[in-house]
Amino acid sequence: MKIGCPTEIKPQEFRVGMTPDAAHEAIAHGHDVFIQTGAGAGAGYTDADYAAAGATLLETAEEIFATADMIVKVKEPQAGERKMLREGQLLFTYLHLAPDPEQTRDLLASGCTAIAYETVTDSFGGLPLLAPMSEVAGRLAPQVGAWTLQKANGGRGVLMGGVPGVPPAKVVVIGGGVVGTHAARIASGMGGDVTVLDRSLHRLKYLDDVFGRDFRTRYSTAAATAELVREADLVVGAVLVPGAAAPKLVSRAQLSEMKPGAVLVDVAIDQGGCFETSKATTHADPIYEVDGVMHYCVANMPGAVARTSTQALGNATLPFLLALADKGWKQACADDPHLLNGLNVHAGQLTYYAVGKALGIDVVSPALAIKS
Ligand SMILES: NC(=O)C1=CN([C@@H]2O[C@H](COP(=O)(O)OP(=O)(O)OC[C@H]3O[C@@H](n4cnc5c(N)ncnc54)[C@H](O)[C@@H]3O)[C@@H](O)[C@H]2O)C=CC1
Ligand SMILES: CC(=O)C(=O)O
Ligand SMILES: [Mg+2]
């Protein structure tokens, strides 16, 4: 198979879909790998690294899209990239379609087959291709939250860990999955006074067993969330209903009850965000204020630490990438129901139920789509 990896073009996105090691493995499996020149630069990989791995360097994204049977990326295809997708071509990347009707429309119109990293599952009930970036974003969230809390950035001037004789920041993490657990661990390590909310008792029990000395847990009801958010210095939004638009758990009206200069970091923004007032921002201009409360809503947080993120994502995607290339997507998905769960679009049909529900589009079952 011809595998193509273009340079990411989302603003301030420095990750790359394939490392030189991944290219080397795919080539050892008998595939041809085409990398756009400069694609790895932001993650610290040179064109020479890819050439040494046996990949062919191509100058432009147009050449990559025209040449490859499978496109491997990091971020959802941007409007210009979507125009280059064609019928029968396989796209393997993050998509986050539920909050993105324009992208969904373009992918359906292109006739391509699109497998979304974020909806591939594993046998432990997890999301193995989302998890590495959730680990990164979760660990970044207290770091960016602490920065936003600084006075010069519009925050209320509270130091995360306090100092002897002065209390630390009150941190509330909504959602105790991968992002939430990593955010809580780091915030607690920085000295914050941390509470994690989740609606899964099983998850709360796990967190209490493992981290009970480091942070508190609380069952997520609207009342508990409202009470904790009112008192918080920093709130991290980390909920997920896989594939679906994020539920709105803090309303605009609640902002007026919060402390002036408190900070909301909405990691769930790539699924539309879990605060009513969230709108996606970029690393170039990450924060804004609404009703005295600072918001940080960057939809590609891991891009800030592109080298760590590229390596972590590459470790997770490689086995799936090789299965898709070795067997073709239909056989690979037929053999692995967890990979089939990644199928969001095929030949003009939407194949992921939660996306169809969010956007009001009819859905064809993925099991039927692989037979078409
Ligand atoms: N902004 C960014 O750069 C990045 C964003 N993300 C996003 O972060 C979000 C969280 O991802 P993960 O932690 O991997 O998901 P996860 O599935 O591991 O955890 C989500 C948790 O939310 C909980 N939850 C669902 N509804 C809830 C509610 N109403 N109240 C409280 N808890 C609730 C679930 O029980 C689960 O424990 C996703 O939207 C993901 O796409 C992930 C990586 C990077
Ligand atoms: C998960 C995701 O969308 C990201 O890492 O950018
Ligand atoms: Mg994202």
Image (cartoon, grey):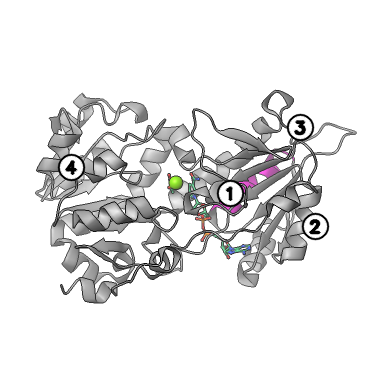
Which of the two labelled residues, at mark 2 and mark 3, occupies the earlier sequence position? 3
Whether residues under marks 2 and 3 lie with C-beta atoms below 8 angstroms apart, the answer is no
Q: CA distance from mark 4 to mark 2?
A: 50 Å
Q: Residue at x 80, y 49 (%)?
A: 257
Dominant secondary structure (helix, strand or loop) of the stretch shown in magenta: helix
Secondary structure of the residue carrying tag 3 is loop
Query: In the image, which disc is placed on residue 360?
Result: none
Q: Give the residues in magenta.
A: 179-191
Query: In the image, which disc is placed on residue 182?
Result: 1
Q: CA distance from mark 3 to mark 1?
A: 20 Å
Query: In the image, which disc is placed on residue 159?
Result: 3
Whether residues under marks 3 and 4 lie with C-beta atoms below 8 angstroms apart, the answer is no
Q: CA distance from mark 1 to mark 4?
A: 33 Å
Q: Position of residue 184 (x, y in %)?
A: 65, 49
Which of the two labelled residues, at mark 2 and mark 1, occupies the earlier sequence position? 1
- The residue carrying mark 4 is 4
Q: Does the magenta run of residues contain 188?
A: yes
Q: Nearer the viewer, residue 120 or 225?
A: 225
Whether residues under marks 1 and 4 lie with C-beta atoms below 8 angstroms apart, the answer is no
Which of the two labelled residues, at mark 4 and mark 2, occupies the earlier sequence position? 4
The amino acid marked with disc number 3 is Leu
Q: Nearer the viewer, residue 32 or 344?
A: 344
Q: Position of residue 114 (x, y in %)?
A: 26, 57
- The residue carrying mark 2 is 227
Which of the two labelled residues, at mark 3 and mark 1, occupies the earlier sequence position? 3
* Picture quarter with the C terminus: bottom left
Foreground label between 2 and 3? 2
Which of the two labelled residues, at mark 1 and mark 4, occupies the earlier sequence position? 4
